[in-house]
Amino acid sequence: MKNFIINPVLNKEFKLRFRSFKSFLGLLFYLLAVGLIIVGFIFIESLSNMQGFFKPDQSRQVFIVLSFLQLALILFITPGLTAGVISSERERQTLNMMLTTTQSSASIILSKLISSLSYLLLLIIASLPLYSFVFLFGGISPGQVLTTMGFYIFTMIVFGSLGVLFSALIRKTIVSMVTTYGVTLFLAGGTAFLTLILLQLSYQFHQTPNPPTSPFPYFTAMLNPVIILLSMFEPEATNEITNRTGIEFPLWASYLISYSVIFIGAILLSIKKLRPNMKKG
């Protein structure tokens, strides 16, 4: 534990990522953009109301829109931050030098993952004060905000581990990045598309009052972060999946279990592939 905290790899990555003025300039523009979206939404909703009031249920809509925007940000930025952490070191011919240090493979992989996701985590934490707009009008509890933030962090870590895995497996950064974005696109969009197709097929081939249940839409839905976030806000929206599959186990719990397995598998495989030709001792 001490070797991980006093880690030259992690310290170097933090200094390289946060000493640039562009990083803080990007943070400023991100907060301005999110703030303008919230204020603009409130202004438009106030104009559409003859009394000029902004109701609590409309405040909840602002929160949902903001939550999906931040989820899209995570899914878009995470592969770009993590897909080249190992392959770029290999292309610069500095990976072998790093492997000759006293740092273990696990320490190097985890340091790369943490340092890559630190900037994205800073964006998420810095946006927390913007939720004061939502609390000002009511309709959202602090528990919902904390649950959403925990969902962001968990999703970010899992998709980041996939980027590190492909960066360790693939030598070229551009190929690793394309692969990571492809897997992210499949998990974020492809699984939702498959869920809709499987639900539609069950209706088409079983047009009876009590059609048989099929578990396949459940397995594709539990891998989709967008559907899981929607189920956290609107549980009724996923009742159709429960009714058609016959599985009453919560989707969010299946999401946590399946993505935890993906994360552990990706980290262990990345550690193993970092030194593929080196024996222990």
Image (cartoon, helix red, strand yellow):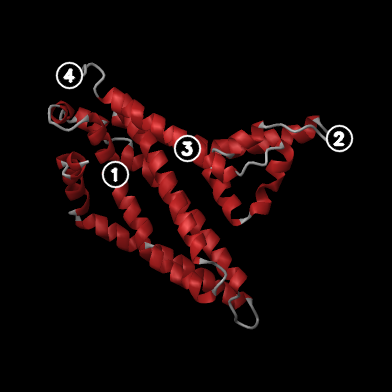
Q: Quarter holding the N terminus? A: top left
Eyeballing the image, is 130 above or below 150?
A: below
N-term mark: 4 or 2: 2
Residue under circle 3? 259
Residue at the far front in the pictured view: 1
N-term mark: 3 or 1: 1
Question: In the image, what residue type sits under mark 4?
Answer: Gly
Q: Please tell me how crowded label 4 is: few (under 14), some (14-19), or many (20+) other residues with Cα within 10 Å.
A: few
Residue under circle 4? 281
Q: Are marks 2 and 1 in contact (CB under 8 Å)?
A: no
Residue under circle 2? 208
Asked where in the image residue 110 lies, by quadrant, the reply is top left
Give the number of the mark in front: 4 or 2: 4
- Label 4 SS: loop
**Which disc number belongs to residue 114?**
1
Eyeballing the image, is 65 above or below 82?
A: below
Question: In the image, what residue type sits under mark 3?
Answer: Tyr
Give the number of the mark in front: 2 or 1: 1
Which residue is at a point 54% across and 50% down the rendered structure image?
A: 229
> Residue 249 in the image: x percent, y percent?
63, 41
N-term mark: 2 or 1: 1
Q: Quarter holding the C terminus? A: top left
